[in-house]
Amino acid sequence: MRQSRARVMLSIALLGLLAACGGGNTRPAPPAPTTAVQAAKPVKIGVALGGGAAKGFAHIGVIKMLEANGFEPVVVSGTSAGSVVGALYASGMDAFEMQAKAVALDQASIRDVRLFSGGLVQGQKLQDYVNQQVGNKPAEKLQKPFAAVATQLETGERAVFVRGNVGQAVRASSSIPGVFEPVKIGKHNYVDGGVVSPVPVDAARQLGAEFVIAVDISNKASGTMPTGMLGIVNQSIAIMGQRLGEQELARADIVIRPRVLDIGASDFSQRGKAILEGEKAAMAAMPQIRAKIEQIQRARAAALAPPPMPACEEPSRMGRLMGRKEKC
């Protein structure tokens, strides 16, 4: 009788010990299934190159530094001088090729004055030069999406050329009122895009750019009198488009302003200085560009990451005997 009671007590003690040892066990979540995780797509960078006549050589320096730091633009928009550089870049040239073209450029090859039109530049030479450089390809066949921005003279509305004759679009975008003859395309006449869009940020967005780097080389009303007819006209256009330009620049992710305001509108002799100033301004903006691009990439990677698996609580042995299951 005593032996039977002892056996019962021992069984109860063993069951209690097992329950105490096995209760409330928590095990880590099982490893996530090994499925391929989609990599975050790269940020689609666009450049919006503003107008500024001979100051436009600064765009080459900016593009050179962007490429050197791994931020090659895949979308290009340009106004006036920016459309010239933009067309060459969109055709497939890199910054070093464009610099070589700039050094070899003779003003006579892009300027054709017609006396019977009041001494205005016709612009046909500029059109032919650009078409030659891009291999006579239409805009939609260039290696990068490209937009040249001009102003429709009859209505004052912005015109964005993304198809057709590249040289003609650049000529329209660069036709400074009072210096160049207006360009007739279809039923309308067009003049310099700087009147309505000095730095074409919105055009770059329309082409699909997710991150727009704007390059502003436009004159500002600084209180000093510009020299020469071209300088006066350029400053007049800058004043007209200044308020619109400020609003559009606010929609850019980064604004780069090379220090080229002391370069004359027609002073091609300072093209080397303009390129260097573009390089310096781009390098100064590089930490900000890198930080913003990395922030976008981190957000994209986080959005693609699978959610963490919850930890599961394993029932004790006694719980299993009683039919309890894992809690997750």
Image (cartoon, grey):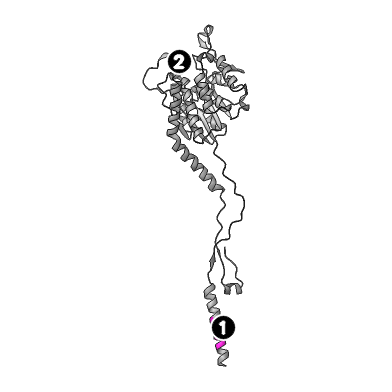
| Coordinates of residue 280 in the picture (x, y in percent) | 43, 30
Labelled pair 1, 2 in contact (Cβ < 8 Å): no
> Which region is colored magenta?
6-13
Q: Secondary structure at mark 1?
A: helix
283 in relation to 238, above or below: below
> How much space separates mark 1 and mark 2, taking CA atoms?
106 Å
Residue 325, image quadrant: bottom right
Q: Residues within 10 Å of mark 1 (few under 14, many from 20)?
A: few
User: Is 7 covered by the magenta stretch?
Assistant: yes
| Residue furthest to the left | 223
Point 55% across, 82% down: residue: 12
Q: Which residue is mark 1?
A: 11
Name the N-terminal-most of marks 1 and 2.
Answer: 1
| Coordinates of residue 308 in the picture (x, y in percent) | 55, 55
User: Is 303 covered by the magenta stretch?
Assistant: no
53 left or right of 40? left
Name the amino acid type tagged 2.
Leu
Relative to the observer, which residue lies in front, 103 or 243?
103
Name the amino acid type tagged 1.
Ser
